Image (tube, grey):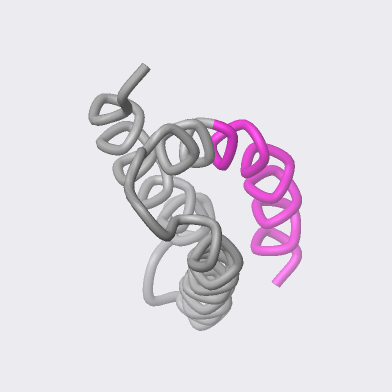
Amino acid sequence: ELDSDFWRRITVAMAPILFAFLGMGFGTVRTRGTRSSVLLVAFVTMALYWQVQVSAIWLGENGTLPPWLALQIPNLLVFIVGGFMFKRATW
């Protein structure tokens, strides 16, 4: 449990950097009606991240996966989606 808490603190500290890339990717998409859906996209993104993080904490505490690996799963998902959206961004 202490290992899970230690790695959770590290992953939570790294999350804002990864969310910045995700925000740049989502923020530069130019379509009609994006102002109305911005709040919904932000809420859904944070809810999904939180759910994956809770699941990863459970996996780390039960011993299904090592805590360092289990708690990197949410950040890896944000990194993959953020990299895809950043590459797709229209500057």
Instruction: Please say whether residue 17 is visible from this viewpoint.
Output: yes
Asked whether 2 or 21 is in front, the reply is 21
* As drawn, 39 above or below 90: below
Identify the residue shown where x is 53% and y is 81%. Answer: 58
Asked whether 3 or 39 is in front, the reply is 39
* As drawn, 10 above or below 39: above
- Locate residue 45, reporting x and y percent: 50, 65
- Locate residue 66, reporting x and y percent: 44, 60
- Locate residue 76, reporting x and y percent: 38, 46
Which image quadrant for residue 64? bottom left
Range covered by the magenta-colored residues: 1-20
Instruction: Please say whether residue 60 is visible from this viewpoint.
Output: no
Considering every residue shown, the one lying at the far front of the view is 32
Asked whether 82 or 13 is in front, the reply is 82
Q: Quarter of the image containing the N terminus?
A: bottom right
Question: Magenta part mainly helix, strand or loop?
Answer: helix
Asked whether 5 or 35 is in front, the reply is 35
- Locate residue 63, reporting x and y percent: 46, 75
Q: Quarter of the image containing the C terminus?
A: top left
Identify the residue shown where x is 70% and y is 50%. Answer: 12
* As drawn, 36 above or below 55: above
Residue 84 highlighted magenta (yes or no): no
Considering every residue shown, the one lying at the far top of the view is 91
Identify the residue shown where x is 48% and y is 48%. Answer: 75
74 to the left or right of 53: left
Which image quadrant for residue 70? bottom left
Identify the residue shown where x is 65% and y is 63%. Answer: 4
